[in-house]
Image (cartoon, rainbow, N blue to C red):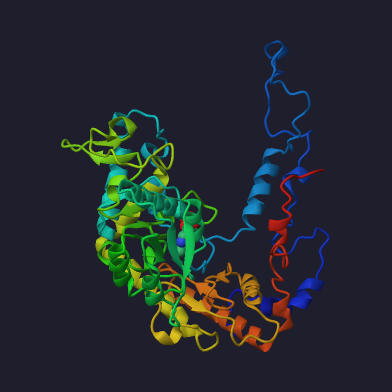
């Protein structure tokens, strides 16, 4: 096992107990430095900047906003400041350091080409209030990306302004409400399957709808009979994730959509998992009315602390007229301009429901996403989804001998492999395995989600991992699964080799310390 376990904590230490016995005078371990807060290492006697002379007091006289006490910011010399932040950055895990198995998040490598494009001054330095004639290139990027998203999804329109997936969900539901109001129909209920991402019911509730849960079948999909039986005049729509959060394709989505439409409702599809089907399935063909696309999941862009995101929403012909302002449109001469409040009516968009945001959107995400799409081409995108699904199935089949795969027998998965804690020794849980993964040098997978599986572990390798990288991860997972099943007490106290040991999972949320008091 040790030869696969290249992160090597066992061979290096002998045992974790031994690792703990080693104490250093600094509290530092190996090359990992113990880092104090900047307020603890800085003080007012230091300054990284050389001011040339004192400020002329006369300029400040009588100013009402003048401070009466020192501001108490920690002073550091320049090398101290650089070292502090560099050391903190080394305590982070990143996609540039290793495989990031977080299910549902599509943590893939971001091509450096896209980063380069996003930094072109013509994209990076534009201001939203610039005259449109001076930002034609940026507007064309937005417009071309919008066309690609419409083509890839087979929809009629797209709202580009939402800033993230959850924001896109809100945009989609507001479009649905605008469409219902336009026909004088005040429906109140949104149906959401049990396996949905937490943002779905949260968004529906935020938009003022009552949320009702739809159960799943034993094979991990939406129970079509239960859903159709609930449809009626009070149901505004359904929110369904496809592929769903169990990593399975909802084969009955077209049947569901037809039934929802026949009952006068709309179909919202959570498209966060579009990476599994891009280039192969067009959600528009499945009867979807609105679907957000997480540009930061499917189409490049740093993700997870690398922010910001972008969640464009593609819309069916029934919902497109209600899309929020502003959006781009192309004139007969090829130039692009924005549809905004002042020209919406005369350009035929009087039904737009308003705005999601003050300004158009995340230019850096648009330029990365379009660079990603153009550099892959339609064939390349098809290959992306194929490789993502292949990699997930490789993980599923390589681990199902040691970990319980609740839907493994039902056939291949889509982009992510789902396991449960069934078979772990008494007192051992998914959390123990996840913490053990930190000692193995990996960020843990998504745990305890989806809720429909006990002790769920959701692994999404994405298409950008090599076979060698997957084998190394699988090797670590096999060792950890065996330790969890054998009840290895050292796993119960993992992680042993991280900058911090096992932290209280809820204390930070219940009693957050947001202010440093010296
Ligand atoms: C990530 C995700 C979301 C939310 O997207 P954000 O961009 O994080 O707001 C919604 N649904 C699913 C299934 C997701 O994976």
Residue 311 visible in the picture: no
Q: In the image, residue 361 lies at what x, y percent?
A: 40, 42
Seen from the viewer's position, the closer of residues 68 and 292 is 292
Seen from the viewer's position, the closer of residues 220 and 417 is 220
Left or right placement of residue 322 versus residue 93 in this view: left
Residue 273: quadrant of the picture: bottom left
Seen from the viewer's position, the closer of residues 421 and 303 is 421
Residue 42: quadrant of the picture: top right
Point 44% across, 48% down: residue: 163
Residue 181 visible in the picture: yes
Q: In the image, residue 259 lies at what x, y percent?
A: 30, 68
Looking at the picture, does residue 285 appear above or below residue 292? below
Point 30% across, 44% down: residue: 141
Residue 414: quadrant of the picture: bottom left
Q: In the image, residue 436 lies at what x, y percent?
A: 65, 75
Q: In the image, residue 153 lies at what x, y percent?
A: 28, 60
Seen from the viewer's position, the closer of residues 225 and 55 is 225
Quadrant assignment for the N terminus: bottom right
Most distant residue in the left direction: 332
Point 73% across, 67% down: residue: 501
Looking at the picture, does residue 323 appear above or below residue 303? above
Quadrant assignment for the C terminus: top right
Looking at the picture, does residue 174 appear above or below residue 121? below
Point 53% across, 66% down: residue: 98
Looking at the picture, does residue 428 appear above or below residue 460? below
Number of marks: 0
Left or right placement of residue 502 versus residue 222 in this view: right
Left or right placement of residue 495 versus residue 245 in this view: right
């Amino acid at each position: 096992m040790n030869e696969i376990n290249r992160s090597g904590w066992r061979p290096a230490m002998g045992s974790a107990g031994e690792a703990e016995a080693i104490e250093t005078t600094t509290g530092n371990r190996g090359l990992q430095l113990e880092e104090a807060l900047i307020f603890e290492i800085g003080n007012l006697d230091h300054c990284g900047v050389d001011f040339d002379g004192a400020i002329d007091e006369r300029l400040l006289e009588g100013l009402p906003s003048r401070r009466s006490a020192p501001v108490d910011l920690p002073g550091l010399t320049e090398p101290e400041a650089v070292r502090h932040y560099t050391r903190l950055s080394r305590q982070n895990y990143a996609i540039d350091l290793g495989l990031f198995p977080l299910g549902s998040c599509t943590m893939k490598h971001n091509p450096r080409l896209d980063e380069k494009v996003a930094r072109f001054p013509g994209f990076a330095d534009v201001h939203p209030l610039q005259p449109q004639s001076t930002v034609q290139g940026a507007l064309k990027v937005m417009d071309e990306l919008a066309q690609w998203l419409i083509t890839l999804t087979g929809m009629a329109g797209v709202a580009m302004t939402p800033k993230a997936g959850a924001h896109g969900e809100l945009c989609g539901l507001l479009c649905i409400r605008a469409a219902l109001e336009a026909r004088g129909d005040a429906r109140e209920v949104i149906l959401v399957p049990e396996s949905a991402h937490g943002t779905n019911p949260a968004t529906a509730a935020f938009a003022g709808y009552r949320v009702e849960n739809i159960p799943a079948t034993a094979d991990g999909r939406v129970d079509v009979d239960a859903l159709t039986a609930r449809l009626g005049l009070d149901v505004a729509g359904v929110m369904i994730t496809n592929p769903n959060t169990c990593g399975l394709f909802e084969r009955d989505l077209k049947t569901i959509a037809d039934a929802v439409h026949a009952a006068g409702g709309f179909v919202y599809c959570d498209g966060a998992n579009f990476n599994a089907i891009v280039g192969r399935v067009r959600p528009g063909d499945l009867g979807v009315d609105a679907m957000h696309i997480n540009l930061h999941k499917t189409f490049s862009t740093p993700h997870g602390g690398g922010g910001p995101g972008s969640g464009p929403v593609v819309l069916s012909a029934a919902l497109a007229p209600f899309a929020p302002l502003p959006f781009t449109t192309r004139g007969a001469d090829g130039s692009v301009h924005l549809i905004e409040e002042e020209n919406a009516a005369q350009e035929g968009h009087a039904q737009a429901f308003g705005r999601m945001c003050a300004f158009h959107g995340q230019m850096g995400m648009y330029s990365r996403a379009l660079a990603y799409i153009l550099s892959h081409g339609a064939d390349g995108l098809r290959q992306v989804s194929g490789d993502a699904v292949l990699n997930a199935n490789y993980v599923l089949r390589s681990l199902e001998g040691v970990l319980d795969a609740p839907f493994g027998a039902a056939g291949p998965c889509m982009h992510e492999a789902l396991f449960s804690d069934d078979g772990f020794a008494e007192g051992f849980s998914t959390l123990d395995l996840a913490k053990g993964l930190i000692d193995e040098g990996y960020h843990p997978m998504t745990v305890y989600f989806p809720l429909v599986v006990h002790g769920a572990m959701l692994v999404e390798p994405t298409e950008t991992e090599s076979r060698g990288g997957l084998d190394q991860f699988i090797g670590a997972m096999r060792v950890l699964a065996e330790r969890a099943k054998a009840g290895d007490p050292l796993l119960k106290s993992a992680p042993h080799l991280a900058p911090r040991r096992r932290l209280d999972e809820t204390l930070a949320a219940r009693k957050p310390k947001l202010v440093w008091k010296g």
